[in-house]
Structures are given as structure tokens and as C-alpha cells.
Image (cartoon, rainbow, N blue to C red):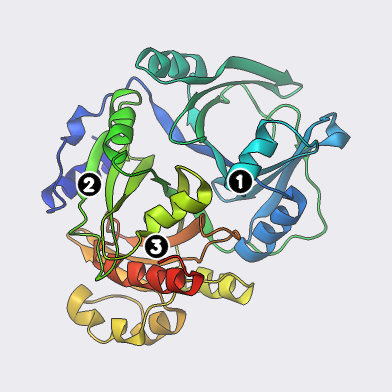
């Protein structure tokens, strides 16, 4: 049993209300990790500058007019294991234009790294997935890549990437992106999980999709009792693949006195989509302070959050005053603790944001911080007039 599976199995022993045993996860779809996340954006050149400056991503690869593309440009940014692709159309009509027009800047593709993209497509489509892209081989002097894809919630898709016969930087058609502007990385390591927001009553169906079509198992379920403040509520279930490398929490709105943050997202994104990408760091204090210095806006919680912190989470390695200064939140489970923080939305619509996390043993999701975080989101909703 891998360490990851063991950790995930332990989560079952905590009282998160698990409904499905992890051993039910089937491995007809072995996933090696997240390959890349592609955003459709209005201006990839400027977005790339933002993600380099504010998040510490590095210039990696480029495709556009100079490489023979006629209809779009894509910038590939990298930081440790995270690959971000930013794509903008060059024409006035087309599916990328439609996506941006409807959703604003947002995540189109969560690409998953597989051994065999053909089998991934066959196994998922035969279980009911709608095909987005039949298996397709692209090659250049560095070898070949096979990709295939399926639809998931909203207009979001999963692309399976098989790169075992490829030695190039990213994909055929891309060239190295040389830039004289290379801000320091911020210590972001890998994607811990990516969260999808779906509409009223749709969470169950999408969890079933990940269970049935992709062989994922539900590892945690939060009801609106777990995730509610005085005014707003949401529900969430966390789906994980067999080796625990890919985790997709799925949220839906729940009834409260005021509008759920998930409903606000759906209103502005015009349907389901990726709410946040959670990225891991080994030193959240350094990462968050560097990001703040470069202009990233984070949610804030009242200072009273820190008053009973040590009683709540016990001994921690960090100095509480420093955590308080950077407004970093802490939660503990049976295996250890975690430190986390949400950014404010990184786009103009109140839709997509990032979460920074440092895990010190804990494999859970910070349930002890939900109330503080969601009250912080409510304050932002209040400022926007959308509560
Ligand atoms: Fe998260």
C-alpha cells in the first residue's frame, strides 16, 4: 500500500462522514499527476506577466504566430511541478472566444498525466464520459505525445496526456520561451487539489461521474452543517483517484439567510467551473509574504482568530505572531496540521482564486478554518453587493 493511500485511508477514521470506502477506487484509469492547467484568457501576454510577477511562475514555452499558429497564442509557465497554460484567441469568433465571452478568464482544461491516453479515453468514454477529443498523436523532433479528452462539469474538460515517448519541453508545436524577465519563484510546488463549483443539487451527479467514469472514490463529505456561517452555506464532497495524487472537491450552494458564495460564483461564471486551484508550498510564510509583496491580495480574518489558536491546534513550529502578521490560518487533524490561505479572486469577476497550503502531516482540508474563511468571503461578497 502506498503512503498516500495509507494516509487517505486514515482520513476515513476521522469523523468526516465518509460514505464510500476508499478501497472501492478502481484503477482502470491510472493517473500519474496533474499535467497542466489551461486557462482561456482575454490577453495571454499580460496574464503571463501577472503570473510570473505575482506568483513566481517561470517562462517555459510559447506557441503563436511565430510558431505557425494562426488562430491563437499560448504561453506555458512553470513552477516546480505546476504547469500553467494561458491561451488567447486571435480572431473574433470561435470556441475560445465563446468561452471567454461567457465565463471571463477561467480554467478550460485540467490535464491529467497518464501512461496511456488511448486507454484513458476508451475506459472513460465506455463508462459514459462525453468525448472532447479522440486520441490524437502529435510529433516533432523530440518524439510524440498522445492526447485525448473528455468533458466534465460546465465547459471544463479533462485532457489525458501521454508523454512517455516525448523529450521536448511541453508539446509539439511549442518552442522554448526565452525571456529576459525572470522573477524569482515563490516556492509553489505542485497542485494539491482543484475545486469545482456546480449548480444546485448537482454535486451528487458530478461525484457519481468521478466515481463511475473515472474510478475515483469519495474520501470526505461536508454537509451544510459543517460549512455554514450565520448567513451562508455550501456543501462539498472530495473525490480522489486511487493513488491520491488527484483530488477534486466538488461544491454546490446550500440555502442560508443570504446568497451562497457558490451561487455567486455560478452567477458570474455563468455555470459550473473551477473555483480554486490549491497549490502546495514548503514554506507558507515565505511564499505568502513574497506574493503579498508582489501584489497578490489575500482574504483576511479578524485578529481574534488567533486568540485561542494554540488551544485549538496545539503545538506548532511557527511563531503565532508571524502567522498573524501574514493572516495565515492553521488547522489540525489526527495526522498533523496544515497552514492555508485563500487569495481574493484573481480575475475581475468574483470567480477563480488560488489557495496556498503547507501540509505538516495533515491530509484533510482545514474544516476548522471553514467558518473563518467563509466569513471572510462573505465580507467580500458584502462589498460587491452580492451577498
Ligand atoms: Fe482548497
Quadrant the C terminus occupies: bottom left
Q: CA separation, marks 2 and 1?
A: 27 Å
Q: CA separation, marks 3 and 1?
A: 20 Å
Element under disc 1:
strand
User: Crowding near pointer 2: few (<14 within 10 Å), some, many (20+)?
Assistant: many
Q: Which residue is denoted by mark 1 in the rendering?
A: 84
Please name whichever residue, 185 or 130, is drawn nearer the observer in this view of the structure. 130
Q: Quadrant of residue 67?
A: top right
Please name whichever residue, 370 or 201, is drawn nearer the observer in this view of the structure. 201
Q: Position of residue 106 (x, y in %)?
A: 57, 47
Q: Are marks 2 and 3 in contact (CB under 8 Å)?
A: no
- Residue located at (66% from left, 48% from top): 77
Q: Are marks 3 and 1 in contact (CB under 8 Å)?
A: no
Q: Is residue 165 above or below residue 318?
A: above
Q: Position of residue 126 (x, y in %)?
A: 38, 12
- Residue located at (25% from left, 80% from top): 309
Q: Which residue is denoted by mark 2 in the rendering?
A: 220
| Residue projecting furthest to the right | 66
Q: Which residue is denoted by mark 3 in the rendering?
A: 358
Q: Quadrant of residue 320?
A: bottom left
- Residue located at (40% from left, 68% from top): 377
Amino acid at each position: 500500500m502506498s503512503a498516500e493511500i495509507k494516509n487517505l485511508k486514515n482520513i476515513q477514521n476521522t469523523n468526516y462522514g465518509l460514505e464510500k470506502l476508499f478501497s472501492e477506487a478502481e484503477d482502470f484509469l491510472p493517473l500519474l499527476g496533474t499535467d497542466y492547467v489551461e486557462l482561456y484568457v482575454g490577453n495571454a501576454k499580460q496574464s503571463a506577466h501577472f503570473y510570473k510577477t505575482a506568483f513566481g511562475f517561470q517562462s517555459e514555452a510559447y506557441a503563436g504566430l511565430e510558431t505557425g499558429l494562426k488562430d491563437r497564442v499560448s504561453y506555458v509557465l512553470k513552477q516546480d511541478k505546476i504547469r500553467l497554460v494561458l491561451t488567447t484567441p486571435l480572431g473574433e469568433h470561435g470556441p475560445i472566444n465563446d468561452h471567454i465571452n461567457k465565463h471571463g478568464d477561467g480554467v478550460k482544461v485540467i490535464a491529467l498525466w497518464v501512461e496511456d491516453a488511448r486507454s484513458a479515453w476508451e475506459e472513460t468514454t465506455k463508462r459514459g464520459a462525453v468525448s472532447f477529443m479522440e486520441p490524437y498523436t502529435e510529433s516533432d523532433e523530440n518524439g510524440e505525445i498522445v492526447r485525448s479528452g473528455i468533458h466534465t462539469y460546465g465547459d471544463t474538460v479533462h485532457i489525458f496526456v501521454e508523454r512517455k515517448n516525448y523529450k521536448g519541453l511541453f508539446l509539439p508545436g511549442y518552442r522554448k520561451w526565452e525571456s529576459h524577465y525572470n522573477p524569482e519563484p515563490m516556492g509553489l510546488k505542485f497542485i494539491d487539489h482543484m475545486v469545482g463549483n456546480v449548480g444546485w443539487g448537482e454535486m451528487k451527479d458530478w461525484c457519481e461521474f468521478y466515481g463511475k467514469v473515472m474510478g475515483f472514490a469519495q474520501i470526505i463529505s461536508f454537509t451544510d452543517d459543517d460549512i455554514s456561517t450565520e448567513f451562508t452555506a455550501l456543501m462539498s464532497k472530495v473525490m480522489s483517484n486511487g493513488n491520491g495524487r488527484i483530488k477534486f472537491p466538488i461544491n454546490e450552494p446550500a440555502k442560508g439567510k443570504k446568497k451562497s458564495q457558490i451561487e455567486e460564483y455560478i452567477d458570474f461564471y455563468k455555470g459550473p467551473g473551477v473555483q480554486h486551484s490549491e497549490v502546495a508550498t514548503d514554506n507558507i510564510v515565505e511564499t505568502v509574504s513574497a506574493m503579498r509583496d508582489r501584489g497578490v491580495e489575500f482574504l483576511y480574518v479578524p485578529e481574534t482568530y488567533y486568540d485561542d489558536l494554540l488551544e485549538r491546534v496545539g503545538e506548532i513550529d511557527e511563531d503565532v505572531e508571524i502567522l498573524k502578521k501574514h493572516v495565515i490560518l492553521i488547522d489540525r487533524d489526527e495526522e498533523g496540521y496544515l497552514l492555508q490561505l485563500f487569495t481574493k479572486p484573481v480575475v475581475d469577476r468574483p470567480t477563480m482564486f488560488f489557495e496556498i497550503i503547507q501540509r505538516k502531516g495533515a491530509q484533510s482540508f482545514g474544516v476548522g478554518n471553514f467558518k473563518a474563511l467563509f466569513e471572510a468571503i462573505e465580507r467580500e461578497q458584502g462589498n460587491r453587493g452580492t451577498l
